[in-house]
Image (cartoon, rainbow, N blue to C red):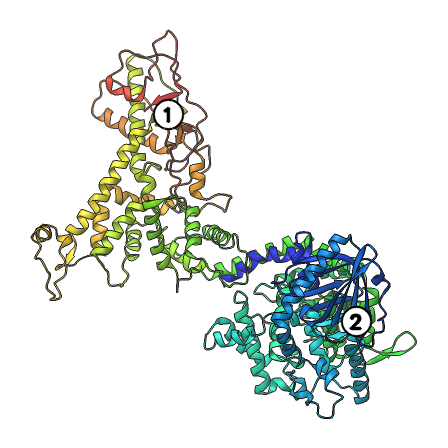
Amino acid sequence: MSFFKSVVGLAQQVLDNLTLNDGLTPDERLRQQFRLPESERLCGSVDCTISVYGCDKKAIKLSPLADLPSEISITQNYLLFDNSEEKIVMHLSSIAELRKIYYHESICISAASVNGWRVLIRIDEIRSRADKFFNTLEFNWGKNLNAKQEIFKEFTKDFFSEWLVNESQLKNHRAMNSLPCGLGFTYKFPGYIEKEQRRQKLKIWYNYYKSIGRNLSIVQTQTFRKMTLQCMTNEIRGEIWSLTSGALYYRFNSPNEYQNLLETNKGKKSAALDDIEKDLNRSLPEYSAYQDEEGISKLRRVLTAYSWKVPDVGYCQGMNIICAALLIFMDEECAFWTLYLICEKIVPGYYTKTMYGALLDQRVFEELINKHMPILGEHFEKHDIKISIVSLPWFLSFFLNTMPLVFAFSVMDRFFLDGDKILFQFSLAIVKENSEKLLNCEDIGECIAVFKEYFATLDESMAYLNGIQLKFDILKQTAFNEFKNIKNSEINKEREKNKKEVIQYIDEFVKRTEMRSLNLHFIKTSQASNIYDLYYSVLLYGIDAPNDGNLKMNFYQFKLFMSKLTPWVNINYKNQLSNSQDAFLRRLFNNWSIDNILSFESLIEGLDKFVDKDSMRLITAFFNLYDSDKNGMIPKSTIMEMADDLNFITTPWRNGILLDSITNKKLEKRIAEVYIKRKEKLAERGLADDNPLPENLSYDREKYEKLQMDRYLTSGSNFLKLAFQYAIPLENDGKSVDTKDSSSSDVIKYNRALDPSRPLFINGSTFRMIIVADETYGGFFENELWRSFDIDKSLGSEGVYGAMMGGLRGAVNVVMTSGQKVASEVKRQMEERNRAGSVTTVGTLGTLGTFSSSAGGGGSGSGSGSGSNSTRDRGGSVGVLSVESRDVGNLLSPMEDESRVLNSSGEDEEEDDDDDEFGNFIPAETQGETLSPSLIDL
């Protein structure tokens, strides 16, 4: 389930390719136009006009466009030309002769094919560019002759076109079914064609192949197009599909890949293979080959190879139908490459776990209905009829599951020629042909019944235009006459308009589906949503090869993820700190991952244990990270590692970057003391004090940092000492220990940790005791660790650590604390003084403000799963506490320091020395003045 999101994350890239081509490089555009393998690169191109001469040396009639300048290109292996009427794809190893002919101020190039036809290229460029183009062509041709000419001959000898031209007229020719061919040659082809009609069509193809090429060296003229649509025979169909889809070129480029995929992955198991097995018997079950083990085995092998070729997709329902159709006309390898081109290039996104390409095209289809058949569109909207529910199977199965097979194959003939716009044209024509009946439908069920009846009668004849025609022939005329103006540009425009909404819908659906299966105890739904977004934003960042199958989180991605989630991970750490970080994160990664693969589910379930607010359970979860044997005991070497890891995860607090709850409490207590002392001194002078706490309180940041840093250093040292002091010794296993070295034996005698004869262990109870007994480490597990995972933060442009450190803009760092706690502390201390019989009457508390953050990062201490700890500027030593009249969390939170406002009332010479630490906050006495301080120095 977790790889759903990876596909969704890549959908934007794929759909961009479906929409506008402006972002394509010349190489990408060329490969897309001619459906060439990814290895082909543009080596040169020039404008030219062409003439083609057949084997009989007679000129072949071309369209008028052939006399207009069009671009001809060369790659490492192909000579390519396309003027929208004629198309030449000529593998360079099929060129038998290459000549340069000087022509006026430029040159002509004559390229003769091994099949006997020749193309004359008149270059309409300056002489220098023409010469450069010819030299490149000649160089690439020479390389192909040396490396691939024999491969070319071996590859093409088993094509039906070669058999038809070279052997069919011989008395001792090979039997046609001895060629690598589809199941139809054994189990017969669907439909019926008269023998004489078949013979005539084959003769037409024979003449064309013999005259102007075949397979890897062919000129596709308008005659070729008409023959494909009107003179197709079952014997030739597989080769034509392979040619027009581009599978032929991929297969020649990687001749052994299909077999290698099967052999390399033989015996392996995957979820995709299980899904394939479930669908094998549902694949065109009406065709006899798929009622037999031979047909089922071929289908299984092709689908299995594809699942290993594209592991991030594996297998999706619908592929089995397409593949079963291909195997009727092709051998396994050819069907494999054709299936690959369909899924990855021709209709990308149709056959994925989310079907994002198909869903987008359903939205486009609905828009086209509204545009070209507005009355019907309004009717569907009025009755809330989602026609896409009916049309989605048409697009996914190329009508193989709805039309009689013989008609669906005819649709596929045109599909491979013209691409996916054919699906829109046929679908619109189907709706158009049934529009009158559909206007009487009031729900989707009635629409389904209309289409079902229509498809069942496609082979029936009816009166049409003063004649009798098959319903299917009428459908084709409607598709290509009334909807001939449905161009790729219009489809792409609608895709561009709707893709954002479709991607968002899929994203939310997949997210809900994946999160529904989570088993969490402490992470809330909203927090899980934030983690989900962060996980996939890290996982999909910078992916250049979406089909490599590596769509699970690796260790580096995990480290990046944690750096955005916690303040104690920083990918920019160097040297020892970086090594300590990697050691602890590797331990987390290994503990949370399954077979070294960290899925979203395994990550969040591991994280769930570390946001538990119960300190005892949290300490146990930390201990379990080191209990690799699951026996409740941790050996001496691991104790050392645990100590190092505790030092690492407390780095922000140990270095004074963040202030912990203990330091916060000291600050709260000190603020209360200063406030009470201030009120007492004012009361002694007879001055009233009805003012709230000042808005800004400066304090000696460096002093509190140093105290905290000393605490953490001491705790780190004490942990190791106590761990070995209370460790449980196990009896020696009987092996003697060499203690000849007297110096080392003395050390061993007095240091239990170094005595190899008495291995030491600690259990979970001992570890909890050591942690709880230490004020700093106990407080860390009770307050800091679970809050350090900022799971309440929605995905933003920067991580937690970056947000914290990015807030240090000035020389003064800002620290926040809870005014509620300060007020409580003031009240507590005043009550104690009153009970003790203080001579000075302090009076009422007055109005106390509450400390809160005016910058981001504050959070409620009671309901939050994350802490908003303070940060500091390493260059400054003064902090500022800001006060507002609203309640916030009980942690220190960062706030930008705008300025330091000092009291302007002057110094009090009578102030006690112990108050110098806080600055002079008692103003000089003046007649009728009321103290209105804005700053108290702590």
Q: Residues within 10 Å of mark 1 (few under 14, many from 20)?
A: many
Q: Is residue 475 visible?
A: no
Q: Who is closer to the viewer here, 183 or 425?
A: 183
In this view, the mark in front (2 or 1): 2
Q: Residues within 10 Å of mark 2 (few under 14, many from 20)?
A: some
Which residue is rendered at x = 20% and y = 25% of the image? 836
Above or below, 902 against 446 in this view is above
Q: Who is closer to the viewer here, 307 or 934?
A: 307
Q: Which mark is residue 225?
A: 2
- Choose the circle earlier in sequence order: 2 or 1: 2
The answer for how far apart the CA atoms under marks 2 and 1 are is 84 Å
Q: Secondary structure at mark 1?
A: strand
Q: Is residue 539 visible?
A: yes
Q: Check if mark 2's residue and mark 1's residue have beta carbons within 8 Å.
A: no
Q: Which mark is residue 541?
A: none
Disc 1 marks which amino acid?
A: Leu
In this view, which residue lies farthest toward the right?
466
Image position of 290 (left or right of 458) = left
Q: Where does residue 196 sit, x and y in percent of width and height?
A: 81, 88
The residue under label 1 is 697
Q: Where does residue 545 sit, x and y in percent of width and height?
A: 54, 59
Residue 124 occupies quadrant: bottom right
Q: Where does residue 867 sit, x and y in percent of width and height?
A: 39, 42
Above or below, 37 against 184 in this view is above
Which residue is rendered at x = 55% and y = 73% of the image? 257
Q: Secondary structure at mark 2?
A: helix
